Image: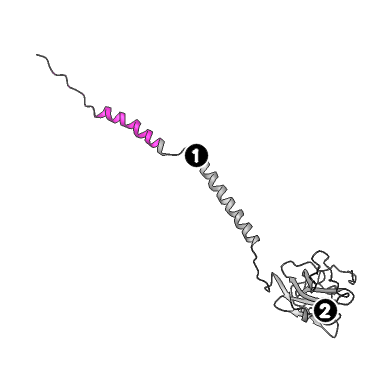
């Protein structure tokens, strides 16, 4: 009589077969090191481009409105002083408008170049005088005396005439000649308070018509 041979259970074999399949599925689901580096590189490029774009937009768009300190400040030609008269101070623009005899129009930053005090025009002495440490300046901003390292800084200015022509001192950094024109011929004066120019060094000779 034949005896039945006990059969082994198929469960361990099935488990061994399923294990590699599960491992393969996990390997497919994950990302390789190369793919991970690609993702990091792509994210870095996006951040870089975003930063560059933000900077371009920041500098391309105007940050100051007209008539606000830091931007182009209009000055009424009717308020221009006559040559040699006391300068006109514009507190909102932080500048003095001076009409220098034999030189022309110049717009001076209101702040002393020493420690930032506010020099005022002294009519009796015919000069700007700083109330803090005694620095003094000519009508055209040139240094006279005191601890200031240079003359008063100036703002680039454009004078527009009624015939459509204009004059600017953005490049010359000198007074704008007006001796050959009438103040009635000036249609507009625009002061760029966002582009301050360093004042003249010690010993600068008087400005003359150029």
**Magenta part of the chain:** 1-27
Q: Which residue is mark 1?
A: 35
What colouring method underlies this structural image? Answer: one colour
Q: Quadrant of residue 94?
A: bottom right
Q: Most prominent secondary structure in the magenta stretch?
A: helix
Expressed as whole percent of the image width and height from the top left, the position of residue 172 reads: 83, 65
Expressed as whole percent of the image width and height from the top left, the position of residue 29 reads: 40, 39
- Whether residue 153 sits left or right of residue 71 in the image: it is right
Residue projecting furthest to the top: 1
Specify few, some or many for label 2: CA neighbours under 10 Å numbering under 14, 14-19, or 20 or more. Answer: some
**Magenta region includes residue 25:** yes
How many marks the image carries: the answer is: 2
Can you tell which mark lies on residue 183? 2
Please report the residue visible at 14 percent of the width from the left and 19 percent of the height from the top: 4
Specify few, some or many for label 1: CA neighbours under 10 Å numbering under 14, 14-19, or 20 or more. Answer: few
Q: Nearer the viewer, residue 49 or 65?
A: 65
Expressed as whole percent of the image width and height from the top left, the position of residue 27 reads: 41, 35
Q: Quadrant of residue 67?
A: bottom right
Can you tell which mark lies on residue 4? none
Q: Nearer the viewer, mark 1 or mark 2?
A: 2
Residue projecting furthest to the front: 163
- Whether residue 62 sits left or right of residue 165 in the image: it is left
């Amino acid at each position: 009589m034949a005896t039945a041979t006990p059969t082994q259970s198929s469960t361990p074999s099935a488990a061994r077969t399923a294990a590699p399949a599960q491992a393969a599925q996990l390997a497919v689901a994950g990302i390789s090191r190369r793919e991970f580096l690609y993702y990091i590189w792509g994210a870095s490029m996006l951040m870089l481009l975003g930063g560059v774009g933000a900077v371009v937009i920041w500098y391309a768009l105007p940050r100051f409105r007209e008539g606000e300190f830091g931007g182009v400040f209009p000055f009424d030609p009717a308020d221009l002083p006559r040559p040699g008269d006391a300068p006109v101070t514009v507190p909102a623009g932080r500048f003095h408008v001076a009409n220098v005899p034999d030189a022309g129009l110049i717009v001076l930053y209101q702040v002393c170049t020493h420690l930032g005090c506010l020099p005022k025009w002294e009519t009796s002495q015919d000069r700007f005088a700083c109330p803090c440490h005694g620095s003094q300046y000519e009508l055209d901003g040139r240094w006279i005396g005191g601890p200031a390292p240079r003359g008063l800084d100036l703002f680039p200015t454009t004078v527009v005439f009624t015939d459509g022509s204009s004059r600017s001192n953005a490049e010359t950094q000198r007074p704008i000649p007006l001796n050959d024109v009438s103040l009635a011929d000036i249609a507009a004066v625009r002061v760029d308070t966002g582009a301050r120019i360093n004042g003249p060094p010690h010993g600068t000779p008087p400005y003359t018509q150029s």
